[in-house]
Amino acid sequence: MRIRTNIQERYTETELHVCKNVQDDEVLRIVGELHAMYDPTITGTDEVGNRTVISPGDIITFYAEKQKVYALGGEKKYTLAKTLTELERELSSCGFFRISKSELVNLRKIRSLDLGVTGTIRVIMKNGYETYTSRRNVSKLKDLLLNDKETTADRKDSREKGGAKV
């Protein structure tokens, strides 16, 4: 195994790259250990009353309703003890964005966006769930998505130029 470090001003966050010609047990083990070290987990209560450890990557949205906070993951719904503000603080680096006063969405689970005439954006998630941004967050969401495209383009340029990989 070879490990390289590349420190440059253009990097604004830490990036880890695992590169090999095949996806074997070693690659899976390394990626699994990295996820275990860096991915946050959340505990919630499922609809039956069981306490469950939830991976944020499996969650489509966190929302507040009737003084409670819920997590929606696929077909499952969990009740959480945290506030949306706490979740926003903890999960913004994991791809969650606050689209309104009462909801955070997982940007990686968005299928499409529909720009409405009313000044809001209808957000359609990969599982078919639909929600809306508040007017005050429309420009923030647009900026975030545009900046993400630029970041993705920067990463592609780096790969094409033979940037360092770990």
Image (cartoon, helix red, strand yellow):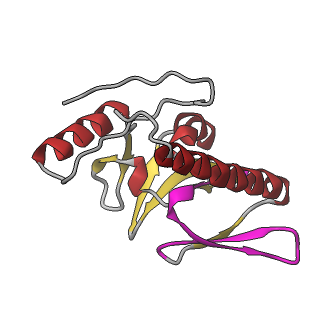
**In which quadrant is the C terminus drawn?**
top left
- In which quarter of the view is residue 146 placed? bottom right
Q: Is residue 132 left or right of residue 11?
A: right
Residue 4, above or below 59: above
The answer to if 105 sits in the magenta stretch is yes
- Residue furthest to the left in view is 25
Q: Residue at x 74, y 62 (%)?
A: 133
| Above or below for 93 versus 148 | above
Residue 138 lies, with reference to residue 7, above or below; the image says below
Q: Give left or right: position of 47 versus 113.
A: left
Q: Residue furthest right?
A: 118
Residue at (64% x, 51% y) in the render: 148
Q: Position of residue 110 (x, y in %)?
A: 56, 66
* Residue pictured at 79% horizontal, 53% vertical: 137
Out of 69 and 108, give the one closest to the viewer: 108
**148 is within the stretch colored magenta:** no
- Picture quadrant of residue 58: bottom left
Count up the numbered dots. Answer: 0
Q: Where residue 120 sits in the image (x, y, percent)? A: 81, 68
Left or right: where 79 falls relative to 52 = right
Q: Is residue 61 visible?
A: no
Which residue occupies the foreground of this view, 18 or 70?
18
Relative image position of residue 134 (x, y in whole percent): 79, 59
The residue under the point 56% across, 24% down is 8
Quadrant for the N terminus in the image? top left
Front-most of residues 137 and 165:
165
> Which stretch appears magenta?
100-127
Q: Is residue 24 visible?
A: yes
